[in-house]
Image: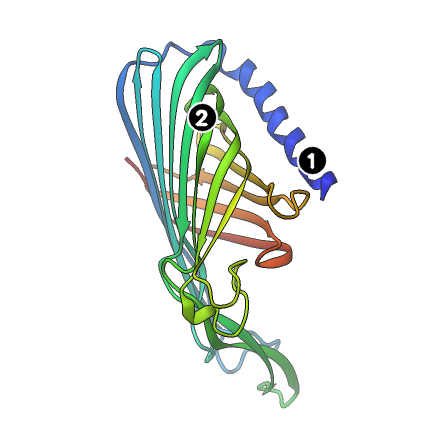
Amino acid sequence: MKKIIVSLSVLMASFGLYAQEETKTEEAPKEGWKRFGNASILFNQSAFNNDWATGGINSLALDLAVSYDVNYLKGDWTWDNKFIGAYGIAKVNNADSQKTNDRLEINSLVGKKAGGLWSYSFFGNFRTQFDAGFETVGESVTITNADGTTRTVEILTIGERNSHFFSPAYLQFGPGMVWKKSDNLKVNIAPATSRFIFVHDEFTVNGDSFGVEQGDTSRFEFGASLQGYYKLNVAKNISVENILSLYSNYLEDPQNVDIDYTMNLVMKVNKYISANLTFQALYDDNTVGAFQIREAFGAGLNYGF
């Protein structure tokens, strides 16, 4: 775990060093409101007819993502707000359709100039999901090919529901210090962060759920938070967005740091068409005592506003 945290810290530091060189010629930011966002719809599809000898499974995937920023600057004060919404679904052959992405997150950060690139800060973060989640159950199925040979594939089917909107939901907030080079590069450190985890009581009837104890509907934690954001324009039509969040709970197992890292790579063909790659790594020992990895790649429609 320590090696992972050090690696991520080195990664963010490298970004910072590179960005300092990159942003030397940037003009001073203008005061007032600044709004910008991006919406994308990604498609992934494969199909095979009955005579395709080497085998294959028909599949269709759709992923919708929206990111919107509203930032304010006035004298020594800044107020940065970011909304992230994403939902994806996939259908594989005759199996039940399953969601591949589900995220609703709101971030808000207020800063008061302290000196240099540092500001006193107070941040708030809320995240949950849009739709219900279900356990997946694997089932082996034997398929006969057109040439008479057979093959075994594993089909995932939907099991019991284990989550839904606002269950779980995470709310955290606290004072700290923010280092901000630009809207594309900032790190917030909050050593006194309160965090609440909310879960509907239907998921805690028989045991713990997302760290909330059996019979309860919420959990309180107090610890330290670090949030980093860096967006790099690799080329004219290629950008990489990095979002990192670390959290340590002082009250229980502070050495088990929660990690949430997301990388969004956008490669534009033109103003409306692009190829997008999203990679997300999660570690939360209240949920699963191992890294959860999600990756999605596809081509589709992209619109900046």
Label 1 to label 2, Cα distance in Å? Answer: 21 Å
Does residue 281 appear to the left or right of 69 in the view shown?
right
Confirm whether residue 91 shows in the render. no
- The image's mark for residue 48 is none
In the rendered view of the protein, which quadrant contains the N terminus?
Answer: top right
**How dense is the environment of label 1, judged by Cα within 10 Å: few (below 14), some, or many (20 and up)?**
few
> Residue 37: where, in percent of width, then height?
32, 36
Counting residues from the start of the chain, the first of labels 1 and 2 encountered is 1
Does residue 53 appear to the left or right of 159 in the view shown?
right
Confirm whether residue 113 shows in the render. yes
Does residue 263 appear to the left or right of 70 in the view shown?
right
The foreground one among 284 and 56 is: 284
Name the residue tied to disc 2: 184
Residue at x 58%, y 48% (from the top left corner): 281
Q: Amino acid at mark 2?
A: Asn
The local secondary structure at tag 1 comes to helix
Name the residue tied to disc 1: 7
The foreground one among 130 and 265 is: 130
> Residue 236: where, in percent of width, then height?
45, 27
Q: Is residue 63 above or below residue 242?
A: below
